[in-house]
């Protein structure tokens, strides 16, 4: 069974109460539960990790080199726009990664338009609220399926 790691960055533990007009009323626990259910349907195992600390996110990404993770889903939250360290960690481990945002970052303040992490991800899903997570997991499952097919050839 392929292993997916879901990483959530700073302030996402406040989902449900945090700026609900922008981020909706779904909690992070609800999102993680839905991700576990969808992963099981897709034949994947999922581990979820949330941290408000940049260093902890960097360390967790680095740990994927020895814990059998096959792919990463990441909402780096505010670190999307600032973190060279998270970008370098994603580049270092070279696992397929999909970047997630609940909000349509490109339609918001200009400082949210730039993502330092997107260039080292396979793609970005943004703007669909909690469904961004669902769509991202479907995309990652497809990437992992194709990788497996490719290896068989
Ligand atoms: C976010 C968008 C970021 O700009 C913001 O800092 C967040 C959440 C989103 O999911 O829409 O914390 O990543």
Image: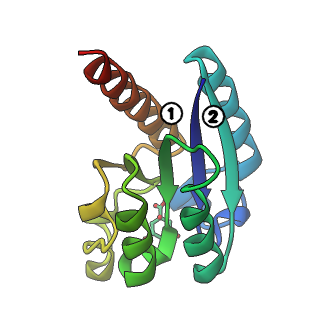
Residue 39 image position (x, y, % from top left): 60, 26
Decide: is 144 above or below 100: above
Mark 1 residue CB less than 8 A from any atom of ligand 1? no
Q: Quadrant of residue 57?
A: bottom right
Give the residue at mark 1.
Answer: 134
Query: Is residue 26 found left or right of 99 in the rendered image?
Result: right
Q: Nearer the viewer, residue 143 or 110?
A: 143
Mark 2 residue CB less than 8 A from any atom of ligand 1? no
Query: Is residue 1 found left or right of 115 in the rendered image?
Result: right
Q: Are marks 1 and 2 in contact (CB under 8 Å)?
A: yes
The residue depicted at 66 percent of the width and 50 percent of the height is: 25
Q: Does any portion of residue 31 appear in the rendered image?
A: no
Q: Earlier in the sequence, mark 1 or mark 2?
A: 2
Q: Quadrant of residue 63?
A: bottom right
Residue 29 image position (x, y, % from top left): 76, 46
Residue 96 image position (x, y, % from top left): 37, 46
Q: Find residue 35 and name its label.
A: 2
Q: Does any portion of residue 20 appear in the rendered image?
A: yes
Query: Is residue 45 found left or right of 116 in the rendered image?
Result: right
Secondary structure under the numbered disc 1 in the rendered image: helix
Q: Quadrant of the C terminus?
A: top left
The residue depicted at 40 percent of the width and 49 percent of the height is: 97
Decide: is 23 above or below 58: above
Q: CA distance from mark 1 to mark 2?
A: 7 Å
The residue depicted at 38 percent of the width and 22 percent of the height is: 145
């Amino acid at each position: 069974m392929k292993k997916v790691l879901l990483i959530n960055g700073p302030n996402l533990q406040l989902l449900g109460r945090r700026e609900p007009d922008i981020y909706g009323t779904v909690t992070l626990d609800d999102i993680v539960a839905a991700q576990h259910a969808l992963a099981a349907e897709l034949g994947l195992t999922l581990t979820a990790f949330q941290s408000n600390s940049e260093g902890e996110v960097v360390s967790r990404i680095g740990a994927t080199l020895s814990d059998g993770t096959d792919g990463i889903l990441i909402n780096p939250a505010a670190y999307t726009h600032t973190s060279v360290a998270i970008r370098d960690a994603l580049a270092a481990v070279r696992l397929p990664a999909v970047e997630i945002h609940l909000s349509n970052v490109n339609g918001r303040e200009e400082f949210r338009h730039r993502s330092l992490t997107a260039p080292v991800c396979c793609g970005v899903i943004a703007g669909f609220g909690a469904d961004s997570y669902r769509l991202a997991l479907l995309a990652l499952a497809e990437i992992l399926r194709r990788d497996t097919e490719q290896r068989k050839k």
